Amino acid sequence: GQARLIGYFLAEGWYQSRTHENGRRVGVSWGLHEQERDTLAATIVALMQSELGVSCSILSATDGTKSLRVASEVSSEAVAFFERWVHGDNAHTKTLDRDL
């Protein structure tokens, strides 16, 4: 389960941050297509709860696109878990830790 979460995060995830706190990471999110609501998004929500004990919400875009976001609650545990295995901040710089 945890390996799947790491893979999903590498492919589609990012850290939620608070700009008023110098960009401190406070949670994690994934960007998906609306058609993935009942499949991949639901899987991520279930895995985050079962593997890390972290609740997530599935949020639809409000800009007219067919995108959605899976967002964790504010969770230092989720941030610490992904920081342990995934290095970098975006699609161009994210890499897997060699010890995985």
Image (cartoon, rainbow, N blue to C red):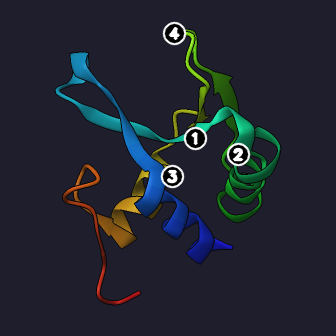
Mark before the other along the chain sequence, 2 or 1? 1
Q: In the picture, which quadrant includes the C terminus?
A: bottom left
Q: Position of residue 42 (x, y in %)?
A: 78, 47
**Mark 2 against mark 1, which lies toward the viewer?**
1
Say left or right for 32 vs 19.
right
Q: In the picture, which quadrant includes the N terminus?
A: bottom right
Q: Which residue is located at x 54 percent, y 61 percent?
A: 8
The residue carrying mark 4 is 63
Q: Nearer the viewer, residue 100 or 31?
A: 31
The residue carrying mark 1 is 32
Q: Nearer the viewer, residue 4 or 2?
A: 4
Mark before the other along the chain sequence, 2 or 3? 2
In the picture shown, does residue 27 fall above or below 47?
above
The residue carrying mark 2 is 41
Tell which residue pokes out farthest to the right in this image: 38
> Is the Cβ of the residue at disc 2 closer than 8 Å to that at disc 3?
no
> Callout 4: helix, strand or loop?
loop
> Is the Cβ of the residue at disc 2 closer than 8 Å to that at disc 1?
yes
The residue carrying mark 3 is 78
Q: Amino acid at mark 1?
A: Leu
Q: Quadrant of residue 70 in the image? A: top right
Q: Position of residue 29 (x, y in %)?
A: 50, 40
In the picture shown, does residue 34 fall above or below 88?
above
Q: Amino acid at mark 4?
A: Asp
Mark before the other along the chain sequence, 3 or 1? 1
Q: Which residue is located at x 72 percent, y 59 percent?
A: 47
Q: Amino acid at mark 2?
A: Ala
